[in-house]
Amino acid sequence: MMSLRNILTLIVVLGSLLPAYWMGISMIEKHQHDLLVEKELKLANSTKGIRDTVEKELLFNANLTQWYSKDRLMVQGMHNVLYSSVVRPKIEDFDELSSSISAAYIIDRDWQPMYEINGSMYHLEKSKLLATVRGAQDLYEKGLTFHTSYNDENLVLDGGPSGIVFVSPLLPYTLVPEAYYEPQGYIMVLVSYEDLAKLSRPFLYQQESVSFQYGKLNKLGYNANRFVTYLTLNKEGFASPVELTIIHRISDVERNKELAQSKEQMIRIIIVALCVTLILAILVTRWLIQPIKEIEKVVRSFRRQIRPEINPHKYQFSEFKQLVSLIDSLWQRVTKQMDQLEIRNTALREANQQVQDTNLQLADFNQRLENTVAEQTAELRASLAREEQYQSRLMTLIHFSAAHTGVSYHDIPNVINSGLETLFPNYGIRFGFAKPDSQTVITLTSSEGNELGYFDCDVLALSCDDTILFELLKKLLHAWLELEDFARRDKLSTCLNRTAFDSDFEHAKAEMQNKSSDFLAVLIVDINGLKTLNDNYGHDRGDTLIVKSAQLIRSALSDRQYLYRIGGDEFAIVARECNQAQLRQLMADLARVQNGQWIDLNDDEQYPLTFSVGGASSETESLSQLISMADSDMYRNKRKYYDISDAAIL
Ligand SMILES: Nc1nc2c(ncn2[C@@H]2O[C@H](COP(=O)(O)OP(=O)(O)OP(=O)(O)O)[C@@H](O)[C@H]2O)c(=O)[nH]1
């Protein structure tokens, strides 16, 4: 932003320089115009000066010529030995009187050259000039002066080769018009153009020249560098007026140089005038802006919050004094009000700080409250989700436990495992009727001690909810499996019953056909002499025999070999992975376990516990023939038993 000081400086400087500049330009233009006029005037004056000088000189020379032609001593000296000695001094005086006479000849009445000044009589005698001037004899006899031009370099020894010639007859008489005279001789004066040009030199600039032509030349074409004037010299005693063409060759270079020098001088003067004006303008500006600078100082001081020292004598103008005084009073009022405002602001800042502190505390409290609410909400949401998931799993469990209808016994593990995968997808819990080879087996046992099935499950890995859910599942399954087991169990012997045998044997055959097991063996066991015991000691004793027989048979079996009571005193064993050799071993074991076995009838009576065993393995028999072959084998062994018994009794 421009300051008032700069604008004022600009106005003063421009206001003073611009008029001076315009005035200077106008002066230069006027001066140039004057110079051009002066140039024309000088040119005209030069030409006039040349013409006047030449005219004056020629007139002077003509006068001298005529005057000397009437000098009595010279006329007498022409043909008089006594006076002849005065001719030369006379002619020498003549030469001294005129600065422009190039040569002068004195010629006798017979046109014989006699004296010369700066000439050659020899050459004059032979020159055309002499012949020419002789031709004007009738003019001489009238006492007139003849004039012509010459162009012969030999006629003037020290001077120009061309010029004007004046010839006047030497007459001892006073001239009377229309009278005839007899010339006593002739005086011939040669004025060279070169000498006339020397006389014109003061009127010429360097590189300018002037030349002369005898007569009036009208055929000169226009040339801007040439100024032509005509001189007509008419004098009493001349045969005719002398006409001379003066050709002044002008040099514009020199004249323009003079103009340029004059213009340069004028410009210098104007520049000096402009500088002086500028200095004056600066001085005036400094004087004018002094109070403005003082006001600026005052304003800067106020801006720095410092009250300046105000000196009224530094201001030339009363307006500035009033302005500074006004600013000072305003500043005092503003300072007072600012102090009051500062006090209020301090109070407001403190109040604001308190509000901010309170707000911060509130914000902190809100934040903590929000965090607590968010945490509790998240916990609640998670709890609800867990509850929902738990309920969903419970519902799954309920649906699962309620969907037992129509499931065959051998499909039960598949159904249970499917349910386990749904309920405990992350734990890999498995269920089966066969005991797995694992460290984490959980056995499901019936209320009567029968093993209903096996879980392969790491209970410790289960979460609290999953443990509860698993226990619930176990209980539900326990009820289901116990019911199934009850249906498959013979009450008396606690062995599996005939229904279970039919089902299990069909399942075992199916496994064989699916190649999931190598061999299958079936054994038929029939108790010996049950009818006799029943008949003689009652059914209770018979039941005891059945129960103890079942216990003995079971003691000989492994985990993969199952015992079934398929008739009153008849049992069946289904043995998986059992070839012919293993079958023989099992039959041997069954024979071994019954050795020395009996039941007590009373204190001193016992009844032998024996049974006949027959078996068949799929290694040697077809599956469809296994039971009948085992049965046949058992009867064969029973007959052997009785044969041996009968033989012993007999
Ligand atoms: N105490 C008792 N007897 C039964 C039971 N079921 C069937 N019996 C009897 O068992 C007897 C079987 O007779 P048999 O087939 O001749 O058998 P056995 O007397 O052992 O003769 P062998 O088989 O040839 O050795 C019948 O008298 C049946 O009444 C039962 O649950 N309890």
Image (cartoon, rainbow, N blue to C red):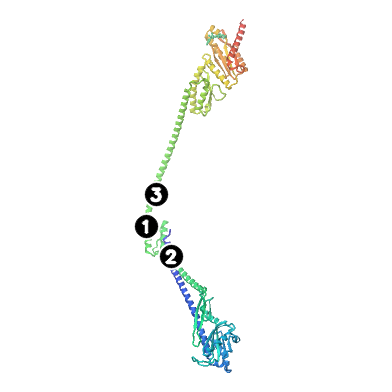
Rendering quarter of residue 314: bottom left
Q: Is residue 148 left or right of residue 288?
A: right
Q: Is mark 2 within 8 Å of ligand 1?
A: no
Amino acid on which disc 1 is placed? Leu
Nearer to us of marks 3 and 1 is 1
CA gap between label 2 and label 3 equals: 54 Å
The image quadrant of residue 638 is top right
Most extreme residue toward the right is 581
- Residue, disc 3: 346
Q: Which residue is mark 2?
A: 14
Please tell me how crowded label 1 is: few (under 14), some (14-19), or many (20+) other residues with Cα within 10 Å. Answer: few
Residue 21 in the image: state x and y as whole percent. Answer: 44, 68
Label 3: which secondary element: helix
Instruction: Decide if residue 316 is on the left or right side of residue 425.
Output: left
Name the image quarter holding the C terminus: top right
Residue 456, numbered circle: none
Kind of residue indicated by mark 2: Leu
Q: Is residue 208 above or below residue 305?
A: below
* In the depicted structure, whether residue 571 falls above or below residue 34: above
Q: Quadrant of the N terminus?
A: bottom left
Q: For this rendering, which residue is in front, 113 or 469?
A: 113
Q: Residue at x 54, y 21 (%)?
A: 433
Q: Are marks 2 and 3 in contact (CB under 8 Å)?
A: no
Residue type, label 3: Thr
x, y percentage for residue 475?
A: 49, 22
Mark 2 is surrounded, within 10 Å at the Cα level, by few (under 14), some (14 to 19) or many (20 or more) other residues, namely some
Q: Pointer 3 and pointer 1: residues touching (CB < 8 Å)?
A: no
Query: Under 8 Å from ligand 1: the CB of mark 1?
Result: no
Q: Position of residue 46 (x, y in %)?
A: 49, 78
- The residue lying toward the viewer, choosing from 548 and 210, is 210
Mark 1 — residue? 330
